Amino acid sequence: MPTFHYPRSMRNAFHEELDDIGLSLIAMAHLVKKAMDDATAAILGPDLELAEKVIAADDAIDNMQHDLDARTIDLMARQSPVASDLRTLVTSLRMSADLERMGDMAHHIAKQARIRYPNRSIPTGLVKTIQEMGRVTHEIIEKLASVMETQDLDRAIEIAADDDEMDKLHRELIAVILADKWDEGSETAFDMTLLGRYYERCCDHAVSISRRVYFLVTGEYRKEEF
């Protein structure tokens, strides 16, 4: 079967568009990191003004996903890519969806800060846990953005191990809520259960993206590390 080759000018333009999609995904990851950092600061404050900024900024993340997906689908339709190029485009669609959901987690945290303002929904005994969850989330997303840019497979695998720390913090939070000595009431228990879930899910999506980077580079899924 003959192999089709793009004319050089067409091929160069195609790969420029591919590169631009990749850069947009990295920019989206940085927006998500900023949103999660600000949401953590808002919920710990509490800081209503910052919470409102996070909620409003979620539209920018959503719009970026819609734009990325439209560009990706358009490129697939126009160029009919095969092999690694097709893998890159399909993977970008899934990455943008995960990043958008990570942005949603920041949005939910900020909304909780807004709903409970001027009160802080975090009881004193769990402030340190939420601070740690915010720190781990920041570090995971920061590493993820680097992995997306460099396609460093060793660091991609590390993200799954980093997520173990978040899982541990989440278990500790739930244990405190379920303990007999919990005296903060059911409303606060509900708030904290949701809050812990938002951080845990955000990091799960980061692990998902790191898996996709591994697949993008190798064409294989490597489940044992992830």
Image: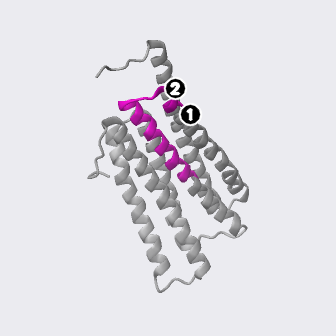
Which residue lies at the image location 34% right of the left edge and 41% below the top edge? 215
Which residue lies at the image location 62% right of the left edge and 52% below the top edge? 38
Does 32 sit above or below residue 119? above
Mark-to-mark CA distance, 1 and 2? 9 Å
Residue receiving disc 2: 17
Magenta stretch, residue numbers: 74-103
> Is residue 79 highlighted in magenta?
yes
Disc 1 + disc 2, Cβ < 8 Å: yes
The one nearer the camera, 6 or 181, is: 6
> Is residue 138 highlighted in magenta?
no
Residue 211 percent across, percent down from the top left: 37, 46
Crowding around mark 2 (Cα neighbors within 10 Å: few <14, some 14 to 19, many 20+) is: some
Which residue lies at the image location 43% right of the left edge and 65% below the top edge? 169
Please state which amino acid type lies under the numbered disc 1: Arg
The one nearer the camera, 6 or 32, is: 6
Residue receiving disc 1: 71
- Say whether residue 130 is left or right of residue 218: right
Q: Residue furthest top?
A: 8
